[in-house]
Amino acid sequence: MRHTVILAGGGTGGHVYPALAMGDALRARGHDVRYYGDAARLEGRVAPERGYSFRGVPAAQFPRSGLAAKLTFARRLLANVAAARRLLRADGATLVLGVGGYVMAPTVLAAWTLGIPTAIHESNVTPGLANRLCARVSKLVLLTYDQTRRHLSATADSVTVGCPVNPLISSGDATKYGLPPGKPVLLVVGGSLGAATINDVAVACAADPHRRYAILHLTGPRYYDELSARYAALPAGLPPDVVVRAYEDRMGDAFAAASLVLARAGSSTLAELCAVGLPSVLIPSPNVTDNHQEGNARGLELAGAARVYVERDLDAQSIATDTRNLLDDQPALTAMGVAARSLARAGVADEVAALLLARFPPT
């Protein structure tokens, strides 16, 4: 017997890539895995590219204020749950795994009303609103961090498993970017949506007249044109050892090229950095629930795997100087990389697949 599993949720790489890692582990065991999400966001492109049958599901974000807006949301949610019920029945779904993001809620709630077993995974220390809601109706809540339990309903059955990582990130083609051989490489990545603050620091690094390293900058699609223009406007134009890409679907290639990573501090990003043993300079996003990215980053800092800068105190030139000094210090980079790898939790996706199948055996 096999399950028809629905992965539900998305919006950012922090939701989508752990979902696909778990989905791949379930597919490797012979189960039919499909993806429900927002066709206009990351999952709508990446999931089909990875061979998943994809369905766009209508969803709406919960309004933070205004009675009329909340009443409108409630009506839309009921309609969206009804639409998800029809899709689940049509696909013969036997298990739903929610992965976070507001687009998850209609599918998980629909599965609950149909008596289909549901589980959810939370990547961050502080769960989002959709996960807090869906934890109340799910049979199992999978956590990355133990401390997340205090944010959930006391009745939620939870297990700490870590953040799933695609094993393919541990191998890649570093040569495809045409970076100069023999130079250290700073990989700059602001997540699947990009990050303006990270981009500002990257430009300051590129403009540093004492820089002795190359830069691979993944800007995020919405920032690519702006950043290309900013680099072109540098006194000597785009430096020959700076490569700018809007996005990279094969992060294993980017990690293979990197000596040091400048990034935000989303849980899935940090799990990947630890899995590949890369040192990092982290600037946590302040625009997240309960400032959870800083909490994520401080764990790596405490272990000696990362340097952390708080955005409110940010000085791009100062960070550029610190980054240059760090990339000139190979023993420090090596020690940070070893510390990062010591924090890696291997086999999370396989562990999740085994746990789901033991808890919800197909019938």
Image (spheres, rainbow, N blue to C red):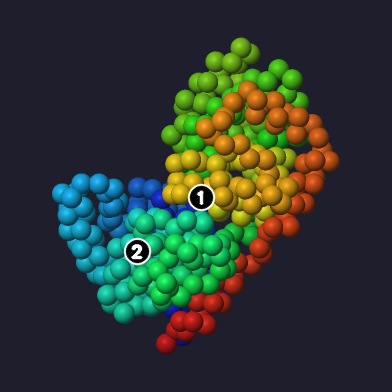
Counting residues from the start of the chain, the first of labels 2 and 1 encountered is 2
Where disc 2 sits, the SS reads helix
Q: Residues within 10 Å of mark 2 (few under 14, many from 20)?
A: some
**Disc number placed over residue 231 in the picture, else none:** none
Q: Where is residue 79? Give x, y as percent.
A: 19, 61
Q: Residue at x 20, y 46 (%)?
A: 66
What type is the residue that disc 1 sits on?
A: His
Q: Which residue is mark 2?
A: 133
Q: Residue furthest top?
A: 235
What type is the residue that disc 2 sits on?
A: Leu
Q: Residue at x 55, y 27 (%)?
A: 200
Q: Where is residue 337? Give x, y as percent.
A: 75, 48
The answer, for residue 154, to whether it is visible in the render is yes
167 and 70: which is toward the camera: 70
- Decide: is 62 above or below 114: above
Q: Which residue is mark 1?
A: 292
* Tag 2–tag 1 contact (CB < 8 Å): no
The answer, for residue 32, to whether it is visible in the render is no
Occupied quadrant, residue 346: bottom right
Q: Residue at x 80, y 45 (%)?
A: 334
Q: Where is residue 339? Give x, y as percent.
A: 75, 52
Left or right side of 81 for 301: right
Spatial CA span between label 2 and label 1: 18 Å
Left or right side of 88 for 235: right
Left or right side of 131 for 174: right
Q: Residue at x 56, y 53 (%)?
A: 268
Quarter of the figure with the C terminus:
bottom left
Q: Where is residue 78? Give x, y as percent.
A: 20, 63
- Decide: is 113 above or below 337: below
